[in-house]
């Protein structure tokens, strides 16, 4: 969720912009509906979370 300034202008992070570009690609170029996009975004989050956990465990082993 983008932050807002005192004047209610949205401030998008680089991650927000990357996610918006991915949504645009998936809907306009690949023809996915929003339910499909949601599933893909959730899978990406799950993979990112698993990767972070793996890296932490690997760090603890070294």
Image (spheres, rainbow, N blue to C red):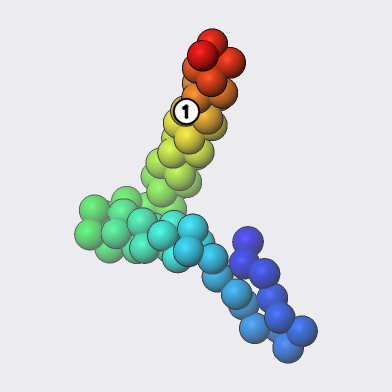
Q: Where residue 36 appears, x then y in whole percent?
A: 39, 45
Q: Is residue 28 left or right of residue 53?
A: left
Residue 49, relative to residue 14: is it above or below?
above
Q: Furthest-top residue in view?
A: 61
Residue 39, relative to residue 52: is it above or below?
below
Q: Which residue is mark 1?
A: 51
Q: Where residue 22 appears, x then y in whole percent?
A: 36, 56
Residue 61, relative to residue 45: is it above or below?
above
Q: Furthest-front residue in view?
A: 62
Q: Is residue 5 left or right of residue 24?
A: right
Residue at 65% across / 83% down in the picture?
9
Q: Is residue 59 left or right of residue 44?
A: right
Residue 17, relative to residue 33: is it above or below?
below
Q: Total number of numbered labels?
A: 1
Q: Furthest-right residue in view?
A: 6
Q: Quadrant of residue 20?
A: bottom left
Q: Is residue 3 left or right of residue 58?
A: right
Q: Quadrant of residue 1?
A: bottom right
User: Which sits in the foreground, 45 or 14?
Assistant: 14
Q: Where residue 46 appears, x then y in whole percent?
A: 50, 32
Q: Secondary structure at mark 1?
A: helix
User: Which sits in the foreground, 26 or 14?
Assistant: 14
Q: Where residue 17 appears, x then y in whole percent?
A: 45, 65
Residue at 49% across / 58% down in the picture?
15
Residue at 41% across / 48% down in the picture?
37
Disc 1 packing (10 Å; few <14; some 14–19; many ≥20): few
Evaluate whether residue 8 shows in this view: yes
Q: Furthest-bottom residue in view?
A: 7
Evaluate whether residue 50 shows in this view: no
User: Which sits in the foreground, 39 or 22?
Assistant: 22
Residue at 58% across / 16% down in the picture?
60
């Amino acid at each position: 969720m983008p932050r807002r300034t005192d004047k209610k202008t949205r401030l998008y992070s680089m991650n927000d912009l990357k996610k918006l570009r991915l949504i645009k690609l998936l809907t306009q170029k690949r023809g996915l509906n929003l339910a499909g996009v949601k599933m893909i975004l959730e899978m990406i989050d799950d993979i990112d979370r698993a990767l972070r956990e793996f890296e932490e465990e690997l760090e603890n082993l070294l």
